[in-house]
Structures are given as structure tokens and as C-alpha cells.
Image: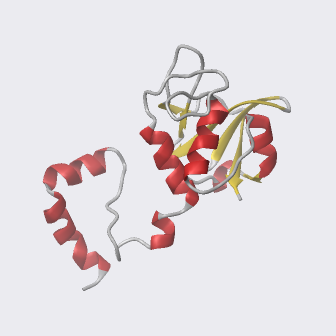
Amino acid sequence: MTALNRVPSLMARAGTASALTIAAVGGSIVAPGFAPEAEAATPATKALQVAASKKGSPYKWGATGPSRFDCSGLTLYSFKKAGKKLPRTAAQQYNKTRHISAQNRKAGDLVFFHSGSYVYHVGIYAGKGKIWHSPKSGDVVKLQKIWTRSVWYGRVK
């Protein structure tokens, strides 16, 4: 049976409501043998899933989890859970990533917000122009549209 032939049976097993939910949030059905395992299990993908699982966690300056985060604390925690080590601050993280263009960004890449050469914020690219991040005091970890063009992208090595 080919991967394409399995889609209807996967949809039937998942149920119509589940398939519609997956489609509505822009997700995909991942099943053994259906998606390449390397694509489904990269550290960047895992880090993105970890960050998303922290939705609603409060911002706290200097916090690195597991229940409170500042911006670089969330990226540090997420990649650590995915088996990758990052330095503590957004600027240090930028210096440790492979810099990539906006055209080459992928879900799981880091998005660095900057003013001139000063990096002041970081989040994890979620696709479709959005990031998971811990924005500021009084806010929580959330998915948000990138609000400026003053961003650089980095891929964790």
C-alpha cells in the first residue's frame, strides 16, 4: 500500500472531526511510514512542539522554565528538550546559529528581533509568518504574527 493510499484509512481512523481540526490549524497527519521520519523528528520540530506546549505560561525576566520564561529562556528550554544546547541570551543565541534568509526560513528556526545591530528578542518560527515566544512582563507564551521587518533568522546547528 502506498502512502497516498493510506490517507483515506488514516482519515477514517482519525475521524472527520479530527481531520478537520488538523486542517483548520494548518497541521498534517503524521503516521509511521507516511511522513519521512527525519522530517517529523528533527530537533527544530521538537523544539517548536515544546514551545507550543508552553502556551499560556507566564513571562518572567530571567526565567528558563519549566513553567515561567523570558524570551530566550523559552528558546533555550525548548531546544534543550529537543537535545540541542543554546546559550542564555537572545544575542548569544543569534551568534551561535547559522544565519539564514527570510526566504530560507523553516518552522523551528529562531527569529531574532533587532534594532540596528542590537538583538533584543527571540522566538521560534512556527510558519505562516508567526512565532511562538514569551513577549514581555505581564504577558504569556503565545503564538503571534511577526510584527516588524527588523528580524534576522537563525538555524540551530
Residue 59 position, x and y percent, is 55, 22
Q: Residue furthest bottom?
A: 1
Q: Is residue 108 visible?
A: no
Q: Quadrant of residue 69?
A: top right
Quick one: quadrant of the N terminus? bottom left
**Colour scheme in the image?**
secondary structure
Q: Position of residue 62 (x, y in %)?
A: 67, 25
Q: Is residue 83 above or below residue 93?
A: below
Q: Is 123 in front, or is 64?
A: 64
Residue that sits furthest to the right in the current view:
117
The residue sitting at 76% across, 31% down in the picture is: 114
Q: Is residue 1 above or below residue 45?
A: below
Residue 105 seen anywhere in this rendered image of the structure:
yes
List x then y, in percent, for residue 12. Answer: 13, 64
* Image: 45 above or below 141: below
Camera-nearest residue between 110 and 151: 110
Q: Residue at x 59, y 36 (%)?
A: 74
Decide: is 14 above or below 23. below
Residue drawn 37% across the image and 49% down it: 26
**Which quadrant would residue 72 be assigned to in this image?**
top right
Say which quadrant the C terminus sits in: bottom right
Answer with left or right where residue 17 lies relative to residue 137.
Answer: left
Considering every residue shown, the one lying at the far top of the view is 138
Instruction: Name the residue: 62% across, 28% down.
Output: 63
Q: In the image shown, does 35 or 81 lie closer to the viewer?
A: 81
Q: Is residue 136 left or right of residue 142?
A: right
Left or right of residue 60, residue 28 in this image: left
Q: Position of residue 40 (x, y in %)?
A: 45, 64
